[in-house]
Amino acid sequence: MHTMWKGTISFGLVNIPVKMHAATENKDVKLRNLHKECRTPVKYQRVCPNCDREVENDEIVKAYEYTKNKFVVLDDEELENLKKEQADKAVEIMDFVNLDEIDPIYFEKSYYLSPNEGGAKSYGLLRSALEDTGKIGIAKMMIRSKEQLAVIRIYQNTLVVETIHYPDEVRDVKDVPNVPEENNTEEKELETAKMLVDQLSAEFDPEKYQDEYRTALMELIEAKKNGDEVTTAEETPKPDNVTNLMDALQESLNRAQKDKKPKTKRKTTTAPKEKKKVAK
């Protein structure tokens, strides 16, 4: 399993060297965009509308737009220094709380933690402490250039980091439109609804749920592939130096021929020479 972060988890004076691994993966079927006419993958370019040309990676800087078309530019060194200051810190568990005190709306992404070299004993110590007390740890950590608020808990005998949103990242429910203040339901309707809930109640089994759209999409793709409904993109010819040189030579020749127009000779009229008088 790929290690995406190495660091230290600490609570009190106990330090646990750990490695972090992504616990989930995106199974979305990625579709490419092709040009309808020639079935070639569409290429997206970074173009500066002011200079009207494509911009290379080394020409791009990062900036914060604090108001419309007003930016504060931040150079890479400044950003790296800030990130390094936070990344070098140990991930300290600040509080221990009950899991049911956190609403699921705060949860974002899950990561597995494994002990790094020399960390197996302290890893087991934290795991046992969380298991016996029924608590989870609240900590802060740097993940992909962002300081994350995180929960450390146990999942099937493994320590897991769950990144959670900060309070100001969760939108206010008061901004949701058209939510009725009161439930205007009849007693009979409510009783029928509760009976339906009871009939559909079951223990949660994640294996019974599947992404039916993704399954159907992959079946459609396989059927088209087996039925030879396959498109092969034509290779775009890449200009080489010889081609460029020939083009340049031809263009130079065309210009030279254009500039070199045949000059029309002007007829010059010279005055008749006077005949010398011969003395008799």
Image (spheres, rainbow, N blue to C red):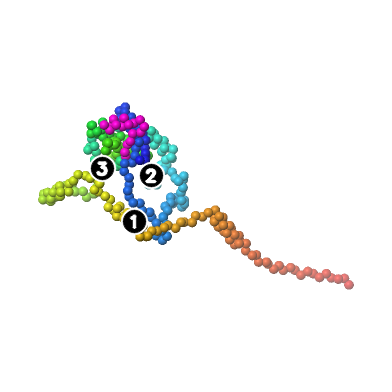
At horizontal 21% and vertical 48% (from top left) the residue drawn is 179
Most distant residue in the top direction:
13
> Which residue extends farthest bottom?
280
Secondary-structure class at tag 1:
helix
What residue is drawn where x is 37% and y is 60%?
228
Q: Is residue 251 above or below residue 169?
A: below
Q: Which residue is painted at 42% across and 52% down in the image? A: 44
Q: Nearer the viewer, residue 20 or 80?
A: 20
Reading the image, the residue beneath label 3 is 105
Marks 2 and 1: which is nearer the front? 1
- Taking the image as drawn, is residue 128 in sight? yes
Task: Report the Cα–Cα distance between label 2 and label 3.
Answer: 28 Å
Residue occupying the point 31% across, 43% down = 24
Number of the front mark, 2 or 3: 3
**Marker disc for residue 132:** none
The x, y position of residue 230, in whole percent, is 38, 58
Disc 3 element:
helix
Mark earlier in primary sequence (2, 3): 2
Is residue 169 shown to the viewer in this render?
no
**Mark 3 → mark 1, Cα distance in angstroms:** 37 Å
**Residue interval drawn in magenta:** 111-128
Amino acid tagged 2: Glu
Please name the residue that numbered disc 1 is placed on.
Answer: 222
How dense is the environment of label 1, judged by Cα within 10 Å: few (below 14), some, or many (20 and up)? few
Give the position of the C terminus as an image quadrant.
Answer: bottom right
Sequence order check, earlier mark of 2 and 1:
2
Q: Which residue is mark 2?
A: 65
Under mark 3, the amino acid is: Ile
Q: Position of residue 91 (x, y in %)?
A: 33, 33
